[in-house]
Amino acid sequence: MLTPLGRGAIASIVVEGPGSIEVVEHFFRGQTRLPLDQAPCNRILFGRWQTAATSEELVICRSEVNRIEIHCHGGHAAPQSVLSSLQTRGCRVLPWRQFLGTSATIAAEAMAALTECETERTAAILLKQYGGVLVQELRRILQQLQSNEQNQGLARLHALIASWDFGQHLTRPWQIVVTGAPNVGKSSLVNALVGFRRSIVTDQAGTTRDLVAADTAIDGWPIRLVDTAGLRSTANVVEKQGISLARQQIRTADLVLEIHDLTVSSDPQPQDLVGHHETPRITVWNKIDLVDVDATAISGLLTSARTGWGIQNLIDHISQKLVGNPPALSAPVLFTSRQYQLVQEVIACLRDGRVPLALQNLTRLCC
Ligand SMILES: Nc1nc2c(ncn2[C@@H]2O[C@H](COP(=O)(O)OP(=O)(O)O)[C@@H](O)[C@H]2O)c(=O)[nH]1
Ligand SMILES: [Mg+2]
């Protein structure tokens, strides 16, 4: 079955292999009464799928000599009924991944990645990789390396390595951890950013004790917001574990939003709640609706999770910080760790003067 499970107008099933025509013929009653083995390829045939129990309208299309597509009503029951009748005649139902084949080609990887990506913007970029922009770039590099333009080739390889930082997020959302003291408005801000009430908001400190993840998209980039327990010293065992989880998340995040409460302090040098580390961060001063402050004296962004003031500005900053300079739509991008590792190996081989091995690895990646 080529279409995903769940709701949909139409489901598509492919029957492939020797004998597929006879199996489909057994159930299909075409309006034109044309025997299937005489049906020309790519001709769409309307008819009914006839079993002892059901008779279902659908269309089929013989797309190759031994390959027939069946397009029936979507949802669960109709395609399942077609699949199980096919199984009674000796067909084996394959998971779609197996149907695509296990070959580690860039096109197959792009096809698999397309099923995992969550936004149109990331899908458009993966579609270009599927269409060949990455393979073409690798072939150009191969040519350069073979014709003694090693430096140019190497520069292009380094540009590909740089694209991985972005490319890995085509199938895995950027992770933003929201942190700060209790009651500063972390959960309220998460809710304001995703546009619906994901986290519980109360005026009691320590309400959020587990990690609460909310998926959204910012500028077309898939984002996972992780709301955390407020960082404070506490005797509560559950809250303590929540705080320790929060600290772990901060270490692996792509971005930390460090939230402060303007009604508590507007110290322009906020105390460093999350310690010194490499994770990029944005400092946010929340509850601007409650205080009168000189915005120019504050380092960081001002927001009100309650009125929505400053939220769009925060969104813009998040996008800028995470993606800054997105690659052009048809730029080559590495999007699997296999590709990334192979390109790194090619660079390492070139650096050590093992040119034949570099070329061999690159050729492997091109196919
Ligand atoms: N006036 C005002 N109240 C806020 C704002 N953000 C949060 N609050 C309130 O502050 C309290 C704590 O908010 P919450 O989101 O649970 O904070 P958290 O503990 O950091 O997750 C709640 O009563 C919220 O309604 C804001 O921007 N303005
Ligand atoms: Mg909270």
Image (tube, grey):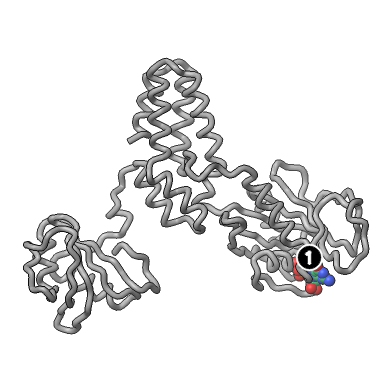
Task: Tell me the residue that label 1 is attached to.
Answer: 309
Q: Ligand 1, what quadrant? A: bottom right
Frontmost residue, 136 versus 241: 136
Q: Does residue 162 appear in this view?
A: yes
Query: Is residue 18 shown above or below 198?
Result: above
On-image quarter of the C terminus: top left
Q: Residue at 53% of width from left, 40% of height from top?
A: 164
Q: Does residue 94 appear to the left or right of 247 in the view shown?
A: left
Q: Residues within 10 Å of mark 1 (few under 14, many from 20)?
A: some
Q: Residue at 10% of width from left, 60% of height from top?
A: 19
- Residue 142: x and y in percent read 39, 25
Q: Does residue 12 appear to the left or right of 39 in the view shown?
A: right
Count of number-bearing discs: 1
- Residue 273: x and y in percent read 80, 52
- Residue 317: x and y in percent read 71, 52
- Residue 53: x and y in percent read 18, 84
Q: Secondary structure at mark 1?
A: loop
The quarter of the displayed image where residue 133 is located: top left
Q: Does residue 327 appear to the left or right of 147 in the view shown?
A: right
Q: Residue at 78% of width from left, 52% of height from top?
A: 283
Q: Does residue 107 appear to the left or right of 186 in the view shown?
A: left
**What amino acid is found at the position of numbered circle 1 in the picture?**
Trp
Query: Is residue 322 shown above or below 265?
Result: above
Frontmost residue, 326 versus 102: 326
Q: Residue at 44% of width from left, 38% of height from top?
A: 339
Q: Does residue 234 appear in this view?
A: no
